[in-house]
Image: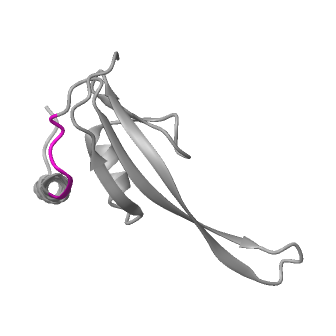
Amino acid sequence: MARKNRKELVKRIAGYAALAEQTLLEIKELDDLEAKYGADDYKSGDVITFGYKFVNRFAYGDGSTSRNYTKVYKCAAIKCNGLWYTTGPKSPKAYTWDDLIQWWDEGKLTYLKKVTKQQTIC
């Protein structure tokens, strides 16, 4: 059996403690988002509609000046087999609920409409 070095073991414990602390912070962030947007209590086939603002910066032909171009996309997400599939510029992409609400919380969500639990074929 290899001899253990006390300093290495203490260092390993400190690393685990830091990892546990970071993980707890990330769980709290997700809990806060769920408090803001609600829990994923939807069934397969349920639809949510939302508006998402995209801001693009572009230069004119000569490159001398640039400005922001803002576009609000009307999007929808449908839940199918535990994942959310979106319409719009970021599709096709499957999101977990945590991924979806983190994307919404980037600050560009303009509205969110929870469609009355529509059952569609999924």
**Residue 113: x %, y % from top left:** 29, 49
Q: Residue furthest right?
A: 62
Q: Give the residue drawn at x 32%, y 60%.
A: 105
Closer to us: 17 or 65: 65
Taking depth in this image into account, of 114 and 86 the one nearest to the observer is 114
Side (left or right) of 35 relative to 76: left
Q: Quadrant of residue 65?
A: bottom right
The stretch drawn in magenta includes residue 69: no
Query: What number of labels is visible?
Result: 0
Q: Is residue 37 magenta?
A: yes
Residue at the spot 22% in from the left edge and 37% down from the top edge:
116
Q: Position of residue 108 (x, y in %)?
A: 42, 63
Q: Is residue 75 above or below residue 85?
A: below
Q: Which residues are magenta?
A: 36-41
For the C terminus, the image quarter is top left
Tell me: residue 100, above or below residue 84.
below
